[in-house]
Image (cartoon, rainbow, N blue to C red):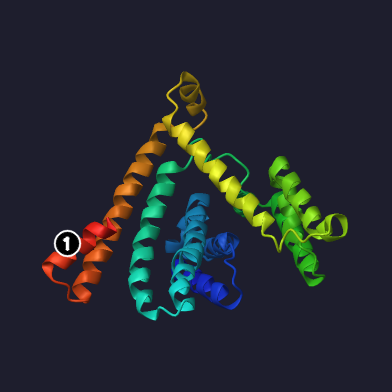
Amino acid sequence: MAVIGAMIGVQLITSLGISANTSIVGAVFAMILARIPLKFLLKFKSIHSQNLVQTSISSATFGAASSLMLPIGIPYVLGMHHLIMPLFIGVTLAMIVDALLLYKMFDTKVFPAKQAWPPGIATAEAIKAGDEGGNRAKYLLTGVGIGIIGAILKIPMSAFGVAFIGNIWALTMFGIGLLLRGYSVPLFGIDINELYIPHGFMIGAGIVALIQVIVLIFNKKKEVAVQDEEFSKPTKELGQAFGYGFIAYTAISILLAVLGGIYTQMSVGMLVGFVLLQW
């Protein structure tokens, strides 16, 4: 499933420029396997096994597309084709580190497990529907049918789904942004998209989120400990994760510097200086 997911991710990112979520594909595939009357496939009747299958294909799709294929397109576009292979080695190692960091951060205040994650909720409900059957299965099939009809009619059905399970404040701000984008020219005489104003808001939101994470990590007050009771991992693990990440990324950069120096036949002195420069 991971191989199939990687193939889907690479195909979509190179042909359409998008990286689709394949969780539902993995869940449905696992459900189909569970219905085959063979002994070694009985384990797929477990919803936990089905969850692992959908996680495998989904992570492979995004990993191959967003973590591997997309970054190595940068030197290709810039005409620096000789940097594609070194960059590919670096982003492959970085992807592994990213996965480990996400594992360390999951179900903390920064990356809570119980918040509205639309793709995850949709996949979970599909798995439960396949396991329990009855009305849940009927609702699932009805939803699939409506989705197909909406897609044929060119209606953005995914937006309807997200509207039911997304965060009300995030969706409200998103709606306001869309309205401003569509009516900024007749109302204000400017095209906010050409001025990259939405991009600026996104960058600003990222900076604010970064500041919030830093404050959370270095906040030693008692209320942080109280808030940690809502999550399976304490906030202090965030600091550890960032520390491990810094060490890992530094090691990757040094490794690439060493490999690059050896490849270009640098002398020992030049190689040491190059590694120190990269560090």
To which quarter of the image does residue 35 belong?
bottom right
Residue at 75 percent across and 67 percent down: it is 148
Residue at 87 percent across and 55 percent down: it is 187
Residue 90 visible in rendering = yes
In the image, 238: left or right of 196?
Answer: left
Residue at 17 percent across and 67 percent down: it is 270
Q: Position of residue 185 (x, y in %)?
A: 83, 60
Residue 232 visible in rendering = no
Q: Residue furthest left?
A: 268
In the image, 118: left or right of 91?
Answer: right
Q: Position of residue 146 (x, y in %)?
A: 79, 62
Say above or below: 51 vs 85: above
Q: Which of these two is toward me, 39 or 86?
A: 86
Q: Position of residue 92 (x, y in %)?
A: 37, 65
Say above or below: 54 vs 5: above
Q: Which of these two is toward me, 108 or 32?
A: 108
Q: Residue furthest front?
A: 189
